[in-house]
Image: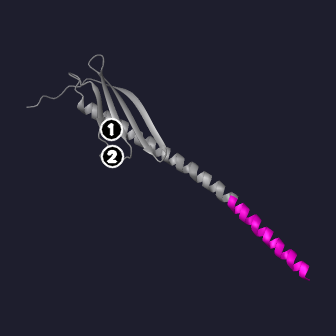
Amino acid sequence: MKIGKTRQNGFVMVFVIVILALVGIYMIVLTSDANTFLFQADHAYLEACEHNLTASGLAWAKKNIDNTKPPTGAFELDTAAMNIRGAVISINVFPGKNGASQVQVSTSCSRARQTLTSARKFTIEARLRQPTE
């Protein structure tokens, strides 16, 4: 009678160990998927920040560059008010053709272990300023 009880207890013990192993494998699969989702979410955030930084740099350039006497050189904008960690906007202005200016907007932003940098060139057409009275 004692042998049957021992076999039943042994079966329950093996069953519990197998269930724990399956739960562990399932947890590993779930955490790897969660890490992939976090990586993709961080990358999407960085792409949105990069787009916003580039748009801000281009808006600054359109507002501050007068094509009658365009400034040349590099300008670095303050990004503290944008509340983006590690954000940098650099603008290089080059004289262009036909009264236009060439502007290179370089951006960099980071989140977690990822850093996204880009450099894009734009042409700013000549604009007429309204005379002030």
Percent x, y of residue 54:
37, 36
Pointer 2 with pointer 1, Cβ within 8 A: yes
Quadrant where the image shows the C terminus: top left
Q: Position of residue 119 (x, y in %)?
A: 41, 30
Amino acid of disc 1: Ser
Q: Which quarter of the figure has residue 56?
A: top left
Q: Is residue 22 magenta?
A: yes
Q: Residue furthest bottom?
A: 1
Q: Position of residue 19 (x, y in %)?
A: 74, 65
Query: Which residue is the site of mark 2?
Result: 82
- Residue at the (34%, 36%) spot, across then down: 89
Q: CA distance from mark 2 to mark 1?
A: 10 Å
**Residue designated by label 1:** 56
Q: Which residues are magenta?
A: 1-24
Quarter holding residue 1: bottom right
| Side of 82 relative to 12 (left or right) | left
Instruction: Please give the count of numbered marks on the rendered protein.
Output: 2
At label 2, which amino acid type do we have?
A: Met
